[in-house]
Image: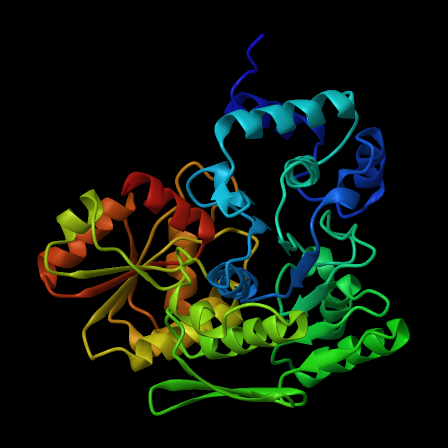
Amino acid sequence: MSLPGSDVILQRMMALHPKIIDLTLDRVWRLLAALEHPEKAVPPVIHIAGTNGKGSTLAMIRAGLEGAGLSCHAYTSPHLARFHERIRVAGKLIDEDTLSAVLDECYTANNSENITYFEITTIAAFLAFSRASADFTLMEVGLGGRLDATNVFEAPAVTVITPVDMDHQQFLGETLPEIAGEKAGIIKRGVPCVVGPQHEAAMDVIEARAARMGAPLMAYGQQWHVWEERGRLIYQDETGLLDLPLPALIGAHQIQNAGAAIATLRVLGQGDAEKAMTDTTWPARMQRLRSGPLVEAAGPAELWLDGGHNPAAGDALAEVLAGLPKRPTHLICGMLNTKDIAGYLRPLAAHAEQLIAVSIPGEANTLPAEDTAKAARSVGLHASTAEDVGKAVARITADAPHARILICGSLYLAGAILRENA
């Protein structure tokens, strides 16, 4: 008997819990037990938490390991165009038959009990990873860390905490120390932890947790350093200095993400640091779109895509724009109604001619375009609305054919663009 397609099973899973997010590990442990604990059979885990840079850092670690001939499972979220992007089995996107099989098995074993979509699909990834050989498993936290569905590994090979900042306060706490405490929940007893650049308040919490757990820290500015010098990336720790190409991912913030990736490879004692810089790809992180119907419609205008969505991401994006060759820049922005809209847009105001706000297509939690435009005006941006991204591009290019156009504000918007522009 053939299984229903993955989309059908995923739709069923959406109805298994009334909330999209409900942070606890009780349901996860119940289903893992029903499946005879597949998480205990996955290859050594590299567990990554943080507010910004998790995905980019994971992608660089994966490029470094695979560049040295090692194979990696990888779990990331959310997906952009297709759910399959979340699960890489031994370096390849999970195929439809395998995905449908593990989803169906999890759905059946769950026996209609309450469980969130993220929890059950994460467990499906564990099941797929447990049945295929690989050298490492790269695991990105979905939200927070302490109570995240990925936080079920007693002894990962290494944990990584990228920069912690304000985001998801309704779930993680209203202060930076509270949020850092949730992120630091992935630190395990005796397991090395690589830490990227942190605010002092966040670092204090991380250091305290590591001390309690006897976890050796490899922290930016202490055990390792990274900087750009004459168009090269320089990394230094107690084992020596590396002179490497700049990361393939654009932006000064990627220097620090690259440092965390290299530090992780050094802790593991494996991987190719140069390949980690040159071979990394990660969509919707200041990605230049070069083909597709939207690019054709834009004509000679530059078209860029970025999925950052919180104030720290706005700061990083503003720094990238400041470093690009001078060109009139126009923003097309759509955001979720759970975000700090003004905080994200404020640093971008100095770098853009205007912002055209859109609602995110097919997304129940989209902020209405007019609300995004209102927030943009409050931070000094000239702002208007458009029915969709295509109409916004047409309006911009009619007035400024050679503009730089940046579509930004949400990974969900970025995913819609990548689907439409395929």
Residue closest to the far top: 1
Residue 14, image x, y percentages: 62, 29
Residue 379 visible: no
Give the quarter of the image for residue 121. Answer: top right
Residue 65 visible: yes
- Identify whether 368 is placed above or below 409: above
From the image, which quarter does the C terminus lie in?
top left
179 with respect to 281 (left or right) = right
318 with respect to 39 (left or right) = left
Report the coloring of the rendering: rainbow
8 with respect to 353 (left or right) = right
From the image, which quarter does the N terminus lie in?
top right
330 with respect to 401 (left or right) = right
Residue shown at 50%/70% (left/top)?
A: 272
Q: How many marks?
A: 0
Residue 417, image x, y percentages: 33, 46
Between 87 and 112, the one nearer to me in the picture: 87
- Identify whether 295 is placed above or below 98: below
